[in-house]
Image (spheres, rainbow, N blue to C red):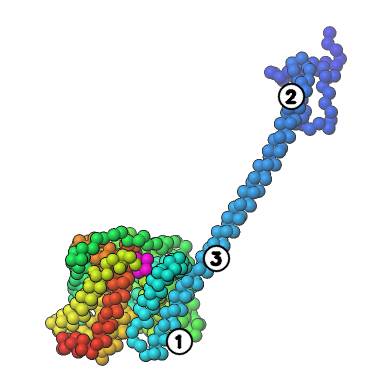
């Protein structure tokens, strides 16, 4: 017979073993549910508690809690590490920005001080070229005495060099943007003749420089050695495109409603004209390679700036010419967007000293090819331009204005200042157009001509298309940059020196007629 204390069978669950009497269930009310379940599950089929399992489960629970706390500590430490990494990354970015500002600022300051000194001393020789060779000389002397100091100096200026290399083509655009102002008074027939000289002269100068370099190398039998690897700047990001777009829209609307908000129209138009120029370059740089071969980012850059100027001239009812006049004022007290960009040209030339230093062994090894090619190609460019101009009947003053077509803008303007009655605006425009032709077609032409080594490619490019050609080639072939840089500089130096000789100027004028 069952006792009164028996548990009703209706409370049983299948497949579980329960104690047969209530007297066997002795659970203290203060025990946790976890311990209750552990104790119940530890009872055997005959109702005898198994103490060992209960202790083990209790210990396991305590160990689990310890493990949980341990895991939490790991998580906290991990979060602290992430915070430390984030803080370190931020500090590195701040330090990098300051490093760039200081290194670039020193180069800009050097260029400005040299310009002021040369103007005060009435020296017509380009100050930036003097600065470039001074910098190169200092690096060479340090490399001979304390090599670590020379390497440290180069590393210090590396952020500035990458910045200049990244934006290099942009600094040559202003003369192309204001081209409508430079050519508006030139007859169409004369313009066609100038274009013929420009394109044909570029191709001829490239061939002369390239074949001269190859011929001299065969004569001296100098073997080609690999160039030192050159750093490449970072690509443009979508954030940069959006940022400049916002600047353009805000400044365009502001200038439209408040045309003299910043004091003068040139200063007020500067932000939107500058941002439109930069935007054109960013968009042009992102185009597919097949398109960029015929539509160089510089063209996109100039078109973008001109479209912005046309839109502002139309909406403000001021016309295009005043807006382009504000783009490039050539007045230090009232600079425009073009003046800001062209203000970097001297620093670009100075920065070439570091590229030459990095490749000093290669330049020294191939000095015969470099100097011979530069001298011959420069003489050919000057005298062939004078001769062709006379043969096709181009006006003498226009012919003289385009004589330094293969020399960079700053030096070309110095050369034509030695002659009377020239159109300096035409000089700048023709120089930029020559560089633009070179930038678009130089790689394809070099491949067709079989100029495969960086020496011939670099010398031929710089001797025929100066800075723009150099920028276009070095962007894709950094190993050719030192040869471009030295040929670019020497072409300008030799052209300036030879034209400063009165007998040479008289001979050129005699050929022009």
> CA gap, disc 3 to disc 1?
32 Å
Nearer the observer: mark 3 or 1; the answer is 3
Q: Is residue 46 above or below residue 459?
A: above
Residue 343: percent from left, percent from top: 41, 79
Question: Callout 1 environment at 10 Å: few (<14), some (14 to 19), or many (20+)?
Answer: few
Which callout, 3 or 1, points at the residue further toward the start of the chain?
Answer: 3
Q: Nearer the viewer, residue 271 or 485?
A: 485
Residue 499 location in percent, x, y? 25, 85
Regarding residue 474, the answer to whether it shows in the image is no
Disc 1 designates what residue? 333
Q: Residue 101, how many percent across, how many down?
A: 49, 71
Residue 105 lies in the magenta stretch:
no
Residue mark closest to the camera, 1 vs 2: 2
Residue 371 is marked as none
Circle 1 SS class: loop
- Which residues are drawn in magenta? 355-359
Q: Residues within 10 Å of mark 3 (few under 14, many from 20)?
A: few
- Estimate the spatial distance between the alpha carbons at disc 1 and disc 2, rounded to whole Å: 92 Å
Question: How far, Cα to Cα, is label 3 from label 2?
Answer: 61 Å
Q: Nearer the viewer, residue 214 or 89?
A: 214
Viewed as shown, does residue 502 lie left or right of 308? left
Residue contact at pointers 3 and 1, CB within 8 angstroms: no
What secondary structure is the magenta-colored segment mainly? helix
User: Which residue matches tag 3?
Assistant: 94
Question: Which residue was labeled with disc 2?
Answer: 53
Circle 3 sits in a helix, a strand or a loop, which is it? helix
Residue displayed at 49% across by 77% down: 254
Quadrant in the picture for the N terminus: top right
Quarter of image, res 115:
bottom left
- Nearest to N terminus: mark 1 or mark 2: 2
């Amino acid at each position: 017979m069952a006792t009164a204390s028996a548990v009703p069978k209706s409370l049983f669950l299948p497949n579980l073993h329960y104690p047969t009497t209530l007297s066997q269930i002795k659970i203290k009310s203060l025990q946790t549910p976890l311990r209750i379940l552990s104790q119940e599950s530890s009872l055997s089929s005959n109702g005898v508690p198994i103490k060992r399992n209960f202790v083990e489960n209790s210990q396991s629970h305590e160990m689990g809690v310890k493990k949980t706390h341990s895991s939490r500590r790991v998580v906290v430490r991990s979060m602290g590490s992430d915070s430390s990494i984030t803080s370190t990354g931020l500090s590195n970015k701040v330090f990098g920005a300051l490093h760039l500002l200081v290194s670039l600022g020193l180069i800009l300051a050097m260029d400005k001080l040299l310009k002021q000194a040369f103007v005060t001393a009435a020296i017509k020789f380009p100050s930036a070229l003097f600065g470039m060779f001074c910098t190169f000389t200092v690096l060479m002397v340090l490399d001979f005495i304390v090599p670590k100091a020379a390497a440290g100096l180069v590393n210090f200026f590396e952020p500035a060099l990458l910045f200049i290399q990244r934006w290099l083509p942009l600094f040559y655009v202003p003369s192309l943007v204001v081209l409508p102002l430079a050519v508006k008074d030139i007859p169409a027939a004369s313009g066609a003749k100038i274009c013929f000289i420009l394109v044909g002269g570029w191709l001829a100068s490239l061939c002369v420089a390239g074949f001269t370099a190859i011929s001299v190398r065969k004569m001296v039998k100098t073997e080609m050695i690999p160039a030192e690897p050159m750093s490449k700047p970072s690509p443009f990001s979508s954030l940069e495109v959006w940022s400049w777009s916002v600047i353009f829209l805000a400044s365009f609307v502001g200038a439209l409603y408040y045309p003299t908000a910043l004091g003068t129209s040139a200063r007020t138009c500067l932000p939107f004209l500058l941002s439109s120029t930069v935007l054109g370059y960013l968009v042009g740089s992102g185009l597919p390679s097949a398109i960029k071969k015929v539509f160089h980012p510089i063209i996109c850059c100039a078109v973008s700036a001109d479209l912005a100027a046309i839109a502002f001239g139309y909406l403000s009812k001021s016309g295009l010419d005043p807006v382009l006049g504000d783009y490039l004022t050539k007045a230090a007290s009232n600079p425009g967007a073009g003046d800001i960009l062209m203000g970097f040209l001297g620093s670009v030339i100075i920065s070439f000293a570091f590229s030459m230093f990095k490749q000093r062994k290669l330049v020294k090894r191939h000095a015969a090819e470099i100097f011979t090619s530069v001298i011959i190609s420069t003489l050919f460019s000057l005298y062939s331009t004078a001769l062709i101009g006379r043969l096709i009947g181009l006006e003498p003053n226009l012919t003289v204005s385009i004589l330094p077509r293969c020399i960079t803008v700053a030096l070309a303007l110095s050369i034509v200042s030695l002659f009377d009655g020239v159109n300096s605006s035409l000089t700048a425009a023709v120089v930029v157009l020559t560089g633009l032709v070179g930038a678009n077609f130089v790689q394809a032409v070099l491949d067709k001509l079989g100029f495969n080594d960086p020496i011939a490619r670099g010398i031929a490019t710089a001797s025929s298309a100066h800075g723009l050609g150099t920028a276009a080639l070095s962007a894709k072939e950094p190993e050719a940059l030192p040869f471009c840089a030295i040929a670019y500089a020497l072409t300008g130096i030799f052209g300036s020196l030879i034209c400063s000789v009165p007998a040479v100027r008289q001979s050129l004028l005699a050929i022009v007629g």
